[in-house]
Image (cartoon, rainbow, N blue to C red):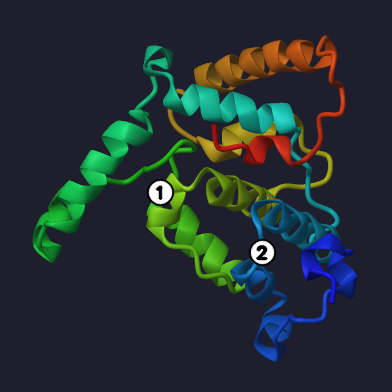
Amino acid sequence: MPDAFDTDFSLAQNITDKAKQKNSPDALLQSATKVGRMKVISGFINEHRPNSAVPDITLIMAIRQQEQDPRARDLSVGDAKDRTRAAEYRKLTPEQKYARRDEFNSWGSMQIGKGIIADVNETFGTNYTHEDAFDRIKSIELFRLYMARYSKENWTQGEMAQKWNPTEKTGRYVREVLERKRIEDERVANSPNKDINESKPYRTE
């Protein structure tokens, strides 16, 4: 029997009734491979949110770079330090967690907060946790689903970046992300291997 994730999303047969009712990709994601997860998310968005904007691969790369680069003057601290903070957070009492909520809000390579996790889960019937922000693949899934939730078909790449980080320094953030994207676009265009596809952002190196 062929793996469901090697076929088109619409042909996959193992979506549960509950997932169908919620229009959720969760059942398929449970047993998917890394590349399979990408196919599930892409197929789900194409089917259920066809009028949302599609982020370029290089935009995802640029946002990851921006969020992890301490020289970017962003609040990001990157994966290694985040994991230390996450371990510390788990030891706090509920009162301490609330008091220090801003300090421990955003985790992982895409700097994802709990609000985004809750929003995506409520909208799409998924079961992501805040710990999933440390998984590079799942963090990109969350980004794509969040954009599918809020974006419109005519949104620019800059508008998606702005939605991802709507801070008082959004203008600077978007400019720096778009500059990083421009560099990535040039790198991809000049690459001898121009077969850059959706699986690229899922690389874990």
* Residue to which mark 2 is pinned: 32
Q: Counting residues from the N terminus, which is met first, the one under dot 1 or under dot 2?
A: 2
- Closer to viewer: mark 1 or mark 2: 2
Image: 132 above or below 140: below
Tally of numbered tags: 2
Q: Position of residue 38 (x, y in %)?
A: 71, 52
Left or right of residue 30, residue 95 in this image: left
Question: Is residue 163 or residue 86 the one in the foreground?
Answer: 86
Q: Residues within 10 Å of mark 1 (few under 14, many from 20)?
A: some
Image x and y of residue 58, in percent: 71, 26
What's the residue at 46%, 36% (across, down)?
109
- In the rendered structure, which amino acid carries the disc numbered 2? Ala
Outermost residue on the bottom side: it is 17
Task: Estimate how packed mark 2 is, as few (under 14), some (14 to 19) or many (20 or more) residues with alpha carbons within 10 Å.
Answer: some
Rendered image quadrant of residue 30 = bottom right
What secondary structure is marked by label 2? loop
Q: Are marks 1 and 2 in contact (CB under 8 Å)?
A: no
Say which of 124 and 205 sits in front: 205
Q: Is residue 22 above or below residue 196?
A: below
The residue labelled by disc 1 is: 113
Is the residue 65 above or below the residue 86 in the image? above
Q: Is residue 77 left or right of residue 97?
A: right
Viewer can see residue 136: yes
Residue at point 66%, 58% (across, down): 33
Quadrant of res 153: top right
